[in-house]
Image (cartoon, grey):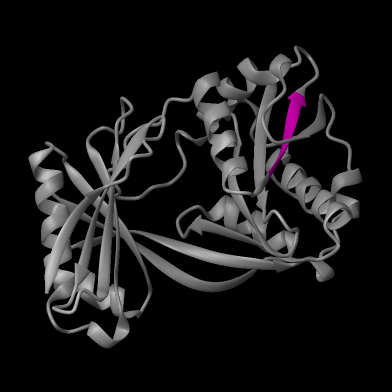
Amino acid sequence: MHITPLTDPNHGLASYRLAWLASDTAGVPVGSAFLRMFTAAGQNHLAELSLTVHPASRRNGIGARLLHAAVAAAREDGRRSVVTQAQADSPGDHFLLAQGLRRVLTLTYARLRLADADVAKITEQPHPGYRLMSWNGTVPDELADTFAASRRAMDDMPMDETDYGTVTWDVARVRAAAEAISKRGDLLHTVVAVDESDGSIAGFTELVVPGDGKGDGQHYGTGVLPEHRGHGLGRWMKAEAIRQAQQRYPDLDGLLTDTAASNVHMRHVNDSLGYVPTHTTYEYQLDL
C-alpha cells in the first residue's frame, strides 16, 4: 500500500486542506484522508479530519496509516487538537475509539418531512417589537454589518468538551460563506428577526437547499443574540424558513438538522416543529 500526500490548491478564507490518498500495489485507491487546517484567529489551533477506507479494504491498517499521516502533519504545524466525526456504532466509531480518540460531543440528527409540516400558526403569531425579514444568497448590503454582528449569537452554543475555539465573523466572511455555497450549486436562504427599535438583526436561521430543489435541505446555523432571548424568536424564524421552503420548492422532500445533545432548548424547538430524530453522531478529538 502507498500513501500519497496531496494539497488542495483552493484555499478558503479561513482554512486550507491537506489530503492523503491510499492505494494498493496496482494503484487502485482504497482510502483517503482530508485534514482541514483552520487559519483564522480563534481557531488556528484546530484541524478537522475526514477519513474513509473502502469497506473491502478495512482491517488492513490503512485507516491507521492515514490517521498517522494526518496527525503528524497537524503536529508539525503546531496544532493543538484534531477533531472528526463518526456515526454511533459505525465502523468509524469503533475505529476512532480503538485509535485512542475521545468522544467530546454528541450530536442528534433529525429530519422534518415537509409534507407533514404545519407551521402557519407559529409564523402568524405576533412577536411585539420584532419583525421577520428574509433573503436569498448573499446578505443585502444594507444589512451586511448588522448580520455579521448577529453571528456572535453562536458563540455560546453548547460544544461540551470540544476544543472548538471561537469564530469571528465580519462582512467579508459572511459573503465568502454565501459565495462558497453558490459555487457548489446550492441555494442559501436566510430568515432574520429584526429589532424594530433600531433595525438591528436580533437572530437568524439559515437553510441550504440543493440547486435542483429536490431531496432534502439542510439547516445551517440558528441563533438569537443573548439580549433578545426568551421571546421565542428561534422557533419563529425556523418556522418561517420551513414555510418558505414549502412554498418555493414543491419537490423538496424534507429538511435536516443536527443539534448538540446538550442543547436542550434547540432540541425542544425542533421537536415542537415536527422534526424526528434519525441517528446520533459523535464528535471525536485527539489532543496533541
Give coordinates of residue 7: x percent, y percent. Answer: 25, 46
Q: Is residue 233 magenta-colored?
A: no
Quadrant in the picture for the N terminus: bottom left
Quarter occupied by residue 232? top right
Give coordinates of residue 130: x percent, y percent. Answer: 80, 27
Kindly tell me whether residue 251 is visible in this rendering: yes
User: Which residue ends up furthest to the bottom in the rendered image?
Assistant: 56
Give coordinates of residue 85: x percent, y percent. Answer: 34, 62
| Residue closer to the observer: 123 or 74 | 74
Give coordinates of residue 36: x percent, y percent. Answer: 30, 46
Q: Which residue is drawn at 56% across and 20% down?
A: 149
User: Which residue ends up furthest to the front in the rendered image?
Assistant: 26
Q: Residue at x 26, y 32 (%)?
A: 44
Q: What stretch is highlighted in magenta?
A: 188-194
Q: Residue at x 86, y 46 (%)?
A: 123
- Does 106 sit left or right of 277 as displayed? left
Quarter occupied by residue 9? top left
Vertical placement of residue 270 versus 194, above or below: below
| SS assignment for the magenta stretch, majority | strand
| Residue closer to the observer: 8 or 136 | 8
Q: Is residue 193 magenta-colored?
A: yes
- Does 253 sit left or right of 280 as displayed? right
